[in-house]
Image (cartoon, rainbow, N blue to C red):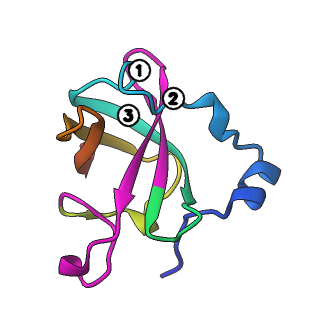
Amino acid sequence: METTVLEFFPALEAGHDPKNYSYAKEQVPLGTYAAKLDFMLWSKSGLTINCFFTLVDSHKKITLSVYRKSANQGRYMAGETEVRYLPFGTELVLTVEANELGKPLLTDMVIAKS
């Protein structure tokens, strides 16, 4: 299966603009809520996937990261979901908690029941 995660310049060429999405802790809500996956980018290091979402209720655009963990055989997991293969446009239910620095941390992601 091929990953749907994009490199930076191909994402721009496809019309995706990361700067329209906020990652500031004041802008990214904590809790559990519905969001649509707009697109995903590899980080410069390749250790992180930056996921870009539009919130279903408010239409606010946010970004959250998923980290590769060696405990998951190098997979990029948000809860039980491997994010590398999710199609853009997928409706998801996100769970976001604050980390020890108070920054938003994506702890779970499940595909929304239609």
The residue located at (44%, 38%) in the rendering is 36
Give the mark nearest the N terminus, 2 or 1.
Answer: 2
Question: Is there any visible trace of residue 58 in the rendered image?
Answer: yes
- Please say whether residue 66 is one of the residues in the magenta stretch: yes
Residue 88 against residue 2 in the figure, above or below = above
The secondary structure type at the circle numbered 2 is loop
Question: Which numbered mark, 2 or 3, is in the foreground of this view?
Answer: 2
Question: Are the residues flagged by discs 2 and 1 in contact, CB closer than 8 Å?
Answer: yes
Which residue is the site of mark 3? 35
Residue 20 against residue 93 in the figure, above or below = above
Name the residue furthest front. 101
Q: Nearer the viewer, residue 81 or 114?
A: 81
| Mark 1: amino acid | Gln
Res 78 quadrant in image = bottom left
Which residue is the site of mark 1? 27
Q: Which residues are magenta?
A: 50-79
Name the residue furthest top. 58
Numbered-mark total: 3
Q: Which mark is residue 22?
A: 2
The residue located at (82%, 52%) in the rendering is 13
The residue located at (77%, 51%) in the rendering is 14
Res 69 quadrant in image = bottom left
The secondary structure type at the circle numbered 1 is loop
Give the mark nearest the N terminus, 2 or 3.
Answer: 2
The residue located at (71%, 54%) in the rendering is 11
- Please say whether residue 70 is one of the residues in the magenta stretch: yes
Residue 103 locus on image (x, y percent): 29, 35
Mark 2 surroundings within 10 Å by alpha-carbon count, few (fewer than 14), some (14 through 19), many (20 or more): some
The secondary structure type at the circle numbered 3 is strand
User: Is 93 on the left or on the right of 84, as rendered?
Assistant: left
Residue 86 locus on image (x, y percent): 43, 60
